[in-house]
Image (cartoon, rainbow, N blue to C red):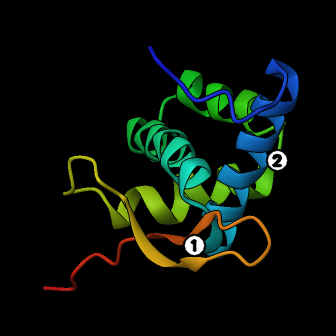
């Protein structure tokens, strides 16, 4: 599987992606650079898929990835998984903003899509 290195070592990249994943899950919306958002959305989708599975193994995999953050994992399994029960992937959306002042990195908003009530 190809991935972006994001100019970091493996441990730093994995930790940063786990933290951004936790932020998206807890806040449901974050502002970051486009390359980070594209990489993080894979992990957010994977965590919600684990939540939809609902097994003990899936819960332990989610806990392992998110550094034993029980609050975030509980939200995934108790709130987000039921919300997206009828949806087959595509739980996030990327909205483009302007370039960041200083280094002209393209900034985006990464958010969870709202599921229709109907």
Image quarter hosting the N terminus? top left
Local crowd at mark 1 within 10 Å, few (<14), some, or many (≥20)?
A: some
Label 2 vs label 1, nearer the camera? 1
Depth check, front residue: 35 or 78: 35
Q: Residue furthest bottom?
A: 117
x and y percentages locating residue 8 in the rendered image = 82, 30
Where residue 10 appears, x then y in whole percent? 80, 19
Residue furthest top in the image: 1
How far from the left and from the top, in percent, is residue 16?
80, 42
- Compared across the picture, whether 104 is left or right of 92 comes to right
Separation of residues labelled 2 and 1 (CA atoms) = 16 Å
Tell me where residue 76 sits by quadrant.
Answer: bottom right
How crowded pointer 2 is (Cα within 10 Å; few <14, some 14-19, many 20+) is rated as some
Dots 2 and 1: beta carbons under 8 Å? no
110 up-or-down from 5: above or below:
below
Indicate which disc residue 110 carries.
none
Disc 1 on helix, strand or loop? loop
The residue lying at 47 percent from left, 36 percent from top is 50
Residue at 64% across, 34% down: 62
Considering depth in this image, is 99 or 33 the residue closer to the camera?
99
Using the image as rendered, state which of residue 16 and residue 84 is in the foreground: 16
107 w.r.t. 66: above or below: below
The residue pinned by badge 2 equals 69
Of mark 2 and mark 1, the one earlier in the sequence is 1
Taking the spot 69% from the left edge, 75% from the top edge, the residue there is 100
Secondary structure found at label 2: loop
Q: Is residue 84 left or right of residue 49?
A: left
**Residue tagged 1:** 28
């Amino acid at each position: 599987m190809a991935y972006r290195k994001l100019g970091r070592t493996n441990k730093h990249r994995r930790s940063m992606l786990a933290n951004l994943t936790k932020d998206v899950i807890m806040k449901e919306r974050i502002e970051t650079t486009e390359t980070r958002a594209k990489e993080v959305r894979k992990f957010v989708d994977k965590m919600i898929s684990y939540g939809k599975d609902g097994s003990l193994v899936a819960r332990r995999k989610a806990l392992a990835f998110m550094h034993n953050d029980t609050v975030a994992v509980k939200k995934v399994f108790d709130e987000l998984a039921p919300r997206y029960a009828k949806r087959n992937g595509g739980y996030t959306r990327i909205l483009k903003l302007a370039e960041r002042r200083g280094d002209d990195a393209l900034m985006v908003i990464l958010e969870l899509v709202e599921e229709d009530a109907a």
